[in-house]
Amino acid sequence: MNLHRAKIDIVEAGRRVYGRGFVASNDGNISCRIEEDRILTTPTGMSKGFLKLEDLCLVDMDGALVSGQRRPSSEIGMHIFLYCQRPDVRAVVHAHPPTATGFAVAGVPLTACVLPEVVIALGAIPIAEYGTPGGPEISEPIRQYVKDYDAYLLENHGATTIGVDVMNAYYKMETLEHFAKILFVAKQLGGYNELNAEQVSKLVAIRDRMGLRGPNPACDIPDAPATQPASDSGIPTIRTLSAGGAPTAQTSQDDLIAEITRRVMEELKRGDAQ
Ligand SMILES: [Zn+2]
């Protein structure tokens, strides 16, 4: 990858993550794998909103500085871990977008099948268990997700996205935060509609045609075996969309018991009246 192009893209992505409030103060870090053993990274202790090309650091695969005036990001270890696990990945963005990070703090993964573009682009966004920032602890919990997912929430911390270039990884961070905002609003309105298995399979077919990789199953389909059922997510699901798009009632066991109780009580009352 062209070094100058990568520098411009990192500075631009840094300006956007800061401008959109995905980070505060000097938080966050962005990198790009320039060559097999060379990574361009943001420096530590600087706001990502005001970086200059000369602020960036070139490091080797051990994180040692090769060239640059500043010290590399303290999270460079996590970036190197991701590059080693996924040779197809050429860029990493780490930030603390407030809504998605709220989900990470609440322990609620973004794994429900809700938005078509998210199912296609990311599949789902799991939560990697908490690890102390700035060291190897933060990487290990990501290992179980790294082969299948391009976006992760980091428990009680933030989010990380990976991509084929800097802007690709950055846009995944935008999608992640946008998804979290929409899901949050839906929750305030009483719950969310989930796409059904047929609808998800059509989106997966589109994803495959586009040559995108993603988790399988793509997300937590209500009537399919799921690794992290939506019912465990802490957000009430009010209904699923039918194939025609019209909402159909999804009756939970509790609803069923409540309905049976109501009908029995009605019968009993009727019996008393007679
Ligand atoms: Zn962080």
Image (spheres, rainbow, N blue to C red):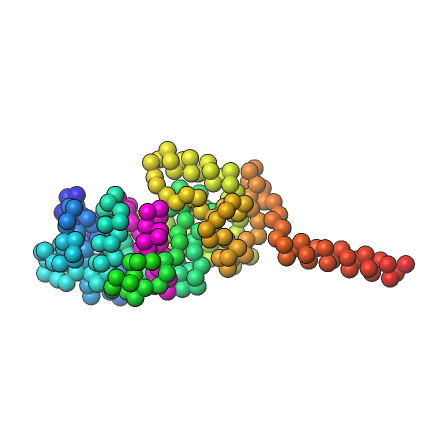
249 on left or right of 69: right
133 on left or right of 108: left
249 on left or right of 40: right
Image position, residue 41 (x, y; %)? 18, 55
Which image quadrant for residue 100? bottom left
- Name the residue: 47% across, 40% down: 200
Q: 180 or 269: nearer the eye?
A: 269
Q: Quadrant of the N terminus?
A: top left
Identify whether 105 is placed above or below 211. Answer: below
Farthest right residue?
274
Residue 51 lies in magenta, yes or no? Answer: no
Residue 145 lies in magenta, yes or no? Answer: yes
Q: Is residue 50 visible?
A: no
Give the magenta range: 142-169
Image position, residue 26 (x, y; %)? 24, 65
User: Could you tell me how many numbered marks the image carries?
Assistant: 0
Identify whether 121 is placed above or below 208. Answer: below
Farthest top residue?
209
- Name the residue: 12% across, 58% down: 65
- Name the residue: 61% across, 45% down: 248
Q: Quadrant of the C terminus?
A: bottom right
Q: 240 or 128: nearer the eye?
A: 128
Q: 222 or 51: nearer the eye?
A: 222
Image position, residue 125 (x, y; %)? 39, 52
Which image quadrant for residue 25? bottom left
Q: Is residue 239 visible?
A: yes
- Name the residue: 43% across, 62% down: 107
Image position, residue 219 (x, y; %)? 44, 47
Q: 181 or 38: nearer the eye?
A: 38
